[in-house]
Image (cartoon, rainbow, N blue to C red):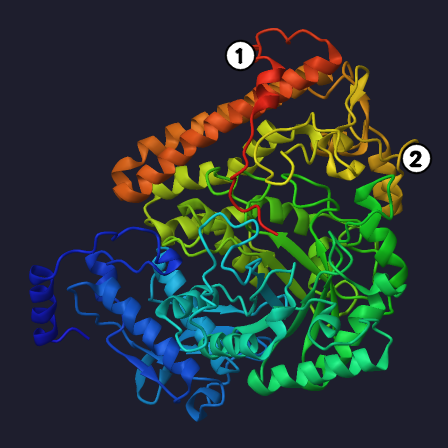
Amino acid sequence: MFTPLRRWLLVLAAILLPAPALAEDGHDLWLRYRPLAAEGAAALPAAVERRGDTPTLRAAEAELIRAFAAMAGETQGRGARVVLAAAADPQVAALGLPLGDLGTEGYLIRQVRLGDAPATLVTGNSDIGVLHGAFALLRHLGSGGALAGVDLASAPRIGLRVLNHWDNLDGSVERGYSGESIWDWWTLPEYTGPRYTDYARANAALGINGTVLNNVNAKADSLTAPYIAKAAALAEVFRPYGIKVYLSARFSAPVELGGLDTADPLDPQVQAWWDAKAAEIYRAIPDFGGFLVKANSEGQPGPRDYDRSHADGANMLARAVAPHGGIVMWRAFVYADTDPDDRGKQAYTEFKPLDGQFADNVLVQVKNGAIDFQPREPFHPLFGAMPQTPLMLELQITKEYLGFNTHLAYLGTMWEEVLDADTMVRGAGSTVARVVDGSLEGHQLTGIAGVANIGADRNWSGSTFDQANWYAFGRLAWDHTLPAEAIAREWAALTFTPDPALTGPVVSMMMGSRQAVVDYMTPLGLAHLMGTGHHYGPAPWIADLARPEWNPAYYHKADRQGIGFDRTSTGSNAVAQYAAPLAARFADPATTPEADLLWFHHLPWDYRMQSGRPLWAELVHRYDRGIGNVAEMRRQWHALAPLVDAERHEQTAAFLAIQQRDAQWWRDASIAYWRSLNGLPMPGGAAAPPRDLDYYQSLSFPYAPGNTG
């Protein structure tokens, strides 16, 4: 509450203290609490009452006090008090509220009478549920909702909602585009600065409940005593916010750290080493979540080194953490030379036969598509193909293949697309979302992971709009039925202002942005055309690397006759990995969605498209459409200058200019290369590339960001 003395002190501080140099630098994310209009500020609660004294309830109380003070400004809130209390509180229990379906993390917010006075009650079956409710109330108010008549209830549809940090122990971040790692391993465990708490607040506001601290390309050092102590220090900060820590485990650690001659998962000494290591970790971190493992992929060690299966390796680790309540997330991203006819088939080939062989506390973590986080891929065929195994969806929040931090690409639409995709394995309605949330096969252990786009930059994600992807991941992880457009509108309101004059254009930009990237990078189902290693810019001509699937040319198969990867029965027959109705649909170009056409088919350049254009003309049209959409985003953003603070507006405007330049480069370089193969003239009205192919092939980017191992 603002007493006269406090108000006077605030005025005095405003006069005497210099204004912060970076008042709108993006650090506050969606927790950017700003004064409400006078009417809304007056309706804010007069007080916050906490019933119980736990770190989590104190965190919820502190968040509400912080937010209400900022939202009220100089206005005195006169609304009913907000009460934070778990369901076990006697007065809350006496209300008979419908809390049975909320689980341990869900919340209910309702206006009630407690004792003899009205109150806005924030409750749940646990303190964590109350915390989630506090953040939900602030989200409601910050996006334009009113306190009067508030009635909100929600529970997560997926159990484990985890960020995967690809952070290395030297401070670098693989595929990171927002500075160095936020984990300062050098000063941990002694120093845990406020940034770690801000990280926990931001994630708890979305319902994210786990974080994997280190890169899947793991170093064994992460499992040594000094680094366990560092992880324990972070766990201490995150615990009140309902966030568990996990570690990526290097499969060969028993050899590298334990001095064993082998890491064979069926060797009793190896099992004993992992049992002891798990016990050591749990002594330091009693609520440690478990292990994430990348094995037998891109040079990482794994069970196949010993002629064992992925199930053998996962189950060994699962046995080690099971007595402590831990789980194992075993990645299905296997990228080794074992299926040379089609890299896209490899995960299915290796994992489908293992269905039902994994321990009960193992999740198989599957990327959204079968290749590698491309701007557009059909959903991964493993979804629906392993009914006896819980599958954890892996999404990439950081934009490794979608323009890094300088291209505006809202990924909520991509993730909505994959979650809504129908696997057809049990008839219509067998969506990827129902596989992931366990409802299709009755799994209780469920999870979703996002490869984080978080770094040490003040704005966390490298750009303002990249924050939206972190936000969208968290919101969809909590409730995959939320529309991507509604999430975008909510984010825009919290990040800028709820004013429709801003949210309308911003949401319009966001909703079309990912398709624009697809159009100017990989239209019509093309994939993996990026420069090798750094994945920056077009390089469809690369064809001389040691292994076929390292080369962009492997993925488009373009020649004088046509373009596209034949995945039908006349090619790799990858279509057979899908349920029969989908396999039949994808096997015929006439029934394959045009968005995936060249993913499944090698077609002649004159193939007639739905627009009536030949394929070549349609391809050029899509490139030009993508550039046009970026130009329109620039126009829309320019018009919003009066509604956005100068710092964030100027950065986004500069990044959109970079995006338009890069989009033109993608278009021109790609067309120059395709013409070198097909010998065709430019379609009528389309401009030829301004440079020859040699120029585009000569470009080199040895210091592109995010390219670390």
Can you identify the residue that label 1 sits on?
A: 690
Identify the secondary structure beneath mark 2.
loop
Which residue type carries mark 1? Pro
Q: Look at the picture and state if 36 lies above or below 356.
A: above
**Badge 1: residue crowd in 10 Å (few <14, some 14–19, many ≥20):** few
Q: Is residue 564 left or right of residue 278?
A: right
What is the distance, in whole Å, between disc 2 and disc 1 at their CAs?
Answer: 40 Å
Between 324 and 549, the one lying in front of the other is 549
* Nearer-N-terminus badge (2/1): 2
Q: Mark on residue 298?
A: none
Viewport quadrant of the N terminus:
bottom left
| Residue located beneath label 2 in the image | 569
Q: Residue at x 53, y 12 (%)?
A: 690
Which of the pair 11/351 is nearer the observer? 351
Measured as percent of width and height from the top left, residue 354 is found at 88, 63
The residue drawn where x is 63% and y is 18% is: 671
Q: Quadrant of residue 340?
A: top right
Hey, what amino acid is under mark 2? Ser
- On the question of residue 423 being in view, the answer is yes
Direction from residue 183 to residue 277 in the image, left or right:
right
Instruction: Tell which of 17 and 304 is nearer to you.
Output: 304
Where is residue 322 shown, x and y percent of the image? 73, 82
Tell which residue pokes out farthest to the bottom in this image: 90
Q: Residue at 58% across / 68% down in the picture?
A: 156
Is label 2 or label 1 in front? 1
Quadrant in which residue 130 is drawn = bottom left
Please tell me how crowded label 2 is: few (under 14), some (14-19), or many (20+) other residues with Cα within 10 Å: few
